[in-house]
Image (tube, rainbow, N blue to C red):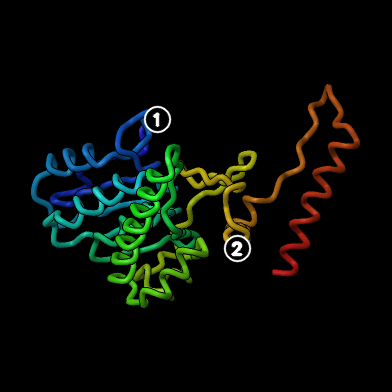
Amino acid sequence: MKYWEVKMKADKVGELLLYGPISDMQFWGDEVTPKQIDAELKALGELDTLNVRINSPGGSVFAGNAIFAILKRNETPNKCAYIDGLAASISSVIPFACNKVIAAGNAMVMIHKPYAAVMGTAELMRQRADLLDKMEETFIDVYEGKSGLDRDKIKEMLAAETWMTAQEALDFGFVDEIEQDMQIAASLDGDFLVLGEARVDLLKVSNEGLTKIKKVYREAIKTPEPVADKDQELSAQSKEFYRLRNKIYEKYEEEN
């Protein structure tokens, strides 16, 4: 399934849909790549307005920075980014290439330090660590330019893996407006939170991030008790498991 698209919505009004992981190349067909975005934006020709809609868990830092640069160079006078669901990791940088950023009422923004898996010699690992530090500085430059927060504050937020609700993103200056009427559908698939086409592995989320996610998507996080097939009764143990799990979430809601 293709989760990115560039199309003409109206006369001289283009739309770029970034609904999927950010990658340098396609592997499964849903990745958003800079080369494709650049080619299809150029094919639209001259525009008055470009709307960029984002719902992405992030991905390749280099690819994300390239998409940011492509959008920044684009000469369309009115560029507006819409965070429809999730702008996490490198996909949280991309909206700031636009003149305005609008978040859906239940959207979330996540920023963190860049990371990479490394195998090799000590020298190679030190080189990779230096590269990650430089990547972090590029993140800070973009976030500082948009939000006006000082660099030390942004560094703290990156180190903590900061998850922001739409209101918090507005308060910190990461978005300009909240579109309350816009609410992305959310559901739970095993250990993954599904936001439209974006999937968040809850096992990899920090405790603070998980708390924020539960507040914003508490109805999706709940696990409905399964209904037994008419020819097969649920075991008492299974029923008790779902009863206790939902009781835990109900207790959480009372305290938060």
Residue 71 in view (yes/no): yes
Is residue 56 something that shows in the picture?
Answer: no
Residue 208: assigned label: 2
First in sequence: mark 1 vs mark 2? 1
Q: Which residue appears at 24% of the width and 42% of the height?
A: 34
At horizontal 31% and vertical 49% (from top left) the residue drawn is: 64
Task: Tell me the kind of residue under disc 1.
Answer: Met
Query: What x and y, as percent, mark residue 63?
Result: 29, 44
For image coordinates 39% across by 28% down, the residue present is 28
Residue placed furthest toward the left = 46
Q: Position of residue 206 (x, y in %)?
A: 59, 57
- Rendered image quadrant of residue 209: bottom right
Where does residue 225 sit, x and y in percent of width and height? 77, 42
Label 1: which residue? 1
The residue type indicated by label 2 comes to Glu
Query: Distance from label 1 to label 2 (Cα)?
Result: 32 Å
How many other residues sit within 10 Å of disc 2, few (<14), some (14-19) or many (≥20)?
Answer: few
Q: Is residue 191 left or right of residue 13?
A: right
Residue drawn at x 29%, y 66% is 141
Q: Is residue 130 left or right of residue 220?
A: left
On-image quarter of the N terminus: top left
- Left or right for 103, reference 96: right
Q: Residue furthest right?
A: 236
Q: Which mark is residue 225?
A: none
Which quadrant is home to the C terminus? Answer: bottom right
Please say if 35 is above or below 207. Answer: above
In the displayed structure, 20 sits above or below 163; it is: above
